[in-house]
Image (cartoon, grey):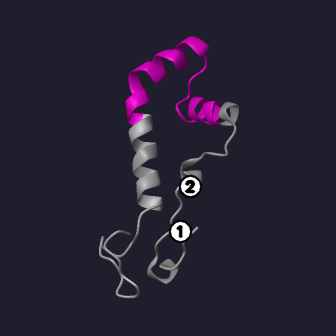
Amino acid sequence: MDNRYYKYGCPPLMSDGRFLTSWVDSDVLNQYIRHVNKIKSSNDYRIFLQKNGNTIINRERAFLIKKNTCAIGGKCPKVGCNKSE
């Protein structure tokens, strides 16, 4: 793990994808989605996921990108800047 740009608001560099892993149990996530959207039956939940699955995935992706990308405007900090990073 590389954390040399922490003071600039950047997350550690990791090549194994741990930062994208959700440690929330799938049953808990499903119950949360059902509760927030006031879905009672399994069939209604299935239809909801079929209609809104792409939106849910895209929102999760946008959240992860925002959370795990550098917050210095896409510019490399002057400290040890390397074009390959």
Q: Quadrant of the N terminus?
A: bottom right
User: Which residue was labeled with disc 2?
Assistant: 19
Q: Is the magenta stretch mostly helix, strand or loop?
A: helix
Q: Where is residue 37 in the image (x, y as percent from the top left)?
A: 52, 31
Q: Image point 34% across, 87% down: which residue?
A: 78
Q: Residue sitting at 39 percent across and 21 percent down?
A: 51
* Residue at mark 1: 12
Whether residue 13 appears in magenta in the rendering, the answer is: no
Report whether 80 appears left or right of 2.
Answer: left
Check disc 2 and give the amino acid type. Phe
Question: Is residue 70 positioned above or below 15 on the image?
Answer: below
Q: In front: 47, or 17?
A: 17
Disc 2 packing (10 Å; few <14; some 14–19; many ≥20): some
Residue range (magenta): 29-55
Graded by Cα atoms within 10 Å as few (under 14), some (14 to 19) or many (20 or more), the crowding at tag 1 reads: some
Rounded to the nearest whole Å, what is the CA distance between mark 2 and mark 1? Answer: 9 Å
